[in-house]
Image (tube, rainbow, N blue to C red):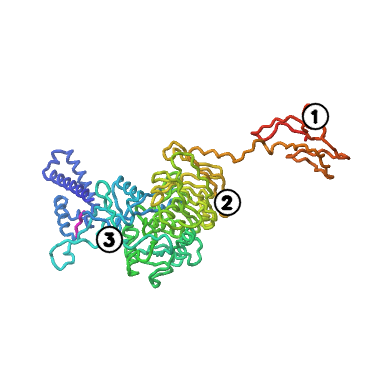
Amino acid sequence: DYSTVNYLFTTFKMILRLTSVLAATGLALLVPSISVGAQKLQRSTALDRQKQKIDGEDLSSAIPSNSRLLLHRKKKAQQKKQLSRRKLQSSQCITIIAIDSISDAMNDGGEENDEDFLCELVHGVTLPIQGTEEQMKEMRAMLHADTLLSNESTLEVLQEIEMIDEMAGADDDSGALQLAEFPSLLQSAVFLPPGNVNLINSSDGRKLNAGFKVQYEGKSPVLVVKVTDKDGLAIEDNADHISDKVFGTSGDEINPAQGFKDCSFGKFELTNEYSVNIEDKLSAPGVIEVSIPISIQKSSQSEIRAAAQKAVEDKLDFELPGPFQQVMFLVENCYGDGCGWAAYAYIRGWLSIYKQDNYLKPGVVLHEIGHNLGFAHSGGLDRRTYSDHTGLMGNPLWGDDMGKMCFNPAKNFQLAVGNNVWYNDGPGKIITWDSGEDGGTVLDTKMVGIAEFDKITENNNVVVKLETGTDKDYFVGFNRATGPTSQNRLASDLVTIYEAGNNGMKYSTSFLNAYLAEGESHTLSNWRGTKQDLTIRVLEINVGVVPGYAHIKIVFGDEPTPPPANNPTSEPTTATPTTPQPTDEPTLPPTNHPTSEPTTASPTTPQPTEQPVVGPFCGDGICDLHESPKDCNTDCIVVDFDAKKGKSDAETNG
């Protein structure tokens, strides 16, 4: 900050003048206390001068101790000889690029990061946008409200530029000033003007990526760039190994290319096949190696990105992104402040950067390219930014052989409905259920996990969006752990519930709200401000069939009472034995082989006699019309029947 430097230098100059005057006039002898203080101040100032550098040259050694005023004159002379000047001016970003990262400590519960923003000033040169805490919160809110469009929106920023004096190499001595070729690299950031953030959303503001559009289906060309700095720092893996880990070219079975193919059921696939012939420039299929003329230990991320991009463009002889949908830069490490990330990516853009060996973890690459596709993070029950372990945009899988995980129901809704891809057709349904506001509505459905989307035969639902009437809605799914999602880290084979903004259609952080096993339920109180509850119940989970399913019932308010049957019976039919009506004919003779035990639903058969019994009489086991418990208690008995319990409180002899 040059105003601060000016102030400090002016103060320093005044102190020097004061001590010089005191020494010259002899006041130090008249006022010992002032003299002692001045001597201490002089010694301190001398030490400070030893540390102070002006344009790389220590000027204090050339200035006599009794001639402090020469310091000012010397400095002025140096400034006049400088061949450059700096100036603060207003500039407009070509575009704003939102970037999102994943912390290299996330597998250990480390710190989490919010989105940051870059200003594209000239092609290949991007600088961080800095502002007050309130301004940065405002920009993030705009991003999540879809008013700030990454790679499209732009705004005015304050940029500190360096003006080059033409006498450094010009033929004339006009002394005219011109803008340096890459003025943005002379600073570490651009700054938001004071006040509210004023976006510019115009169709002609997106110049850098003119013609670039995020691709969600088909083969997506990916270029992987291995970067080596001027000191020889680079990741250890060779190009063939890198190609295998990203594309599976040598047989690696769990890789990002396979992961996207499995999750999309063949609709989206990373490829190293391009529309241009650059085979002679590649070190392995899909992998190019470049060297940059700067040190990654001493350079900012902006400088490293610019240098790496320029090196690739020089080698390929065309500008990035060119024919590529994604460009992955691999660097040895990150040094200095702000290096707590494992990888980061442009949101709705083409660039991602990975440090150390994080590129070979399929879950990390799937996560970062998810940002390229326009996905925000997914938080867990604790509401942290990416603590959701049920899908890729939360805390992904951290391992070379771990990557069988897909996106959660909120992101799947964004894919199918917001972008009309992947799950937008087929037997599996992604629906929106509007409960209304009166209560008494019910959704009874069987849900199938997205992992078995291709095995659905009965038009089952895979995502149910619960419409709230606001831009924040809830999304229900069945987190089936099989096939492409067999390595889920949380809530496997359980019903999961999420919330997300932007109606689930666009970029918005989702949060895990609950996960339920069979027999459990979750209540959303005061649903839609009606003071009535909405309850999600899991009636059954069955993973013993293909596809596995979860039978759920969603009830808003009081569940309606089911109507009675069309023809209800007036008397019980199964709890007590029915008594056959007597006939005029004698009963048939018993069988030669009576059953060993009587049945419970019909009267027991009396033991056969040598001669068949003819005619009704007391003792024949049948309570005839002319008999009663009073005159024939062997055949007839009084029974109290409880219709509610469906059984009697006494037993009969027959």
The kind of residue on which mark 2 rests is Val
Residue 300, quarter of the rendered image: bottom left
The kind of residue on which mark 1 rests is Cys
User: Between 545 and 188, which is closer to the camera in this rendering?
Assistant: 545
**Residue at 82 percent of width and 38 percent of height:** 606
Q: Residue furthest front?
A: 584
Residue bearing mark 1:
632
Earlier residue among tags 1 and 3: 3
Residue 127 in the image: state x and y as whole percent: 30, 56
Disc 2: CA contacts within 10 A as few (<14), some (14-19) or many (>=20): some
Q: Nearer the viewer, mark 1 or mark 3?
A: 1
User: Between 299 and 447, which is closer to the camera in this rendering?
Assistant: 447
User: Between 42 and 307, which is closer to the camera in this rendering?
Assistant: 307
Q: Is label 1 in a helix, a strand or a loop?
A: loop
- Give the side of residue 217 with respect to residue 203, left or right: right
Residue bearing mark 2:
543
Query: Which image quarter holds the C terminus?
Result: top right
User: Between 168 and 44, which is closer to the camera in this rendering?
Assistant: 168
- The boundaries of the magenta stretch are 84-88
Q: Residue furthest right?
A: 610
CA distance for labels 2 and 3? 55 Å
- Give the side of residue 639 with respect to residue 407, left or right: right
Tell me if residue 585 is in the magenta stretch: no
CA distance for labels 1 and 3? 111 Å
Residue bearing mark 3:
122
Q: Is label 3 in a helix, a strand or a loop?
A: strand
Q: Is residue 434 above or below residue 56?
A: above
Q: Nearer the viewer, mark 2 or mark 3?
A: 2
Disc 1: CA contacts within 10 A as few (<14), some (14-19) or many (>=20): some
Q: Are marks 2 and 1 in contact (CB under 8 Å)?
A: no
The kind of residue on which mark 3 rests is Val
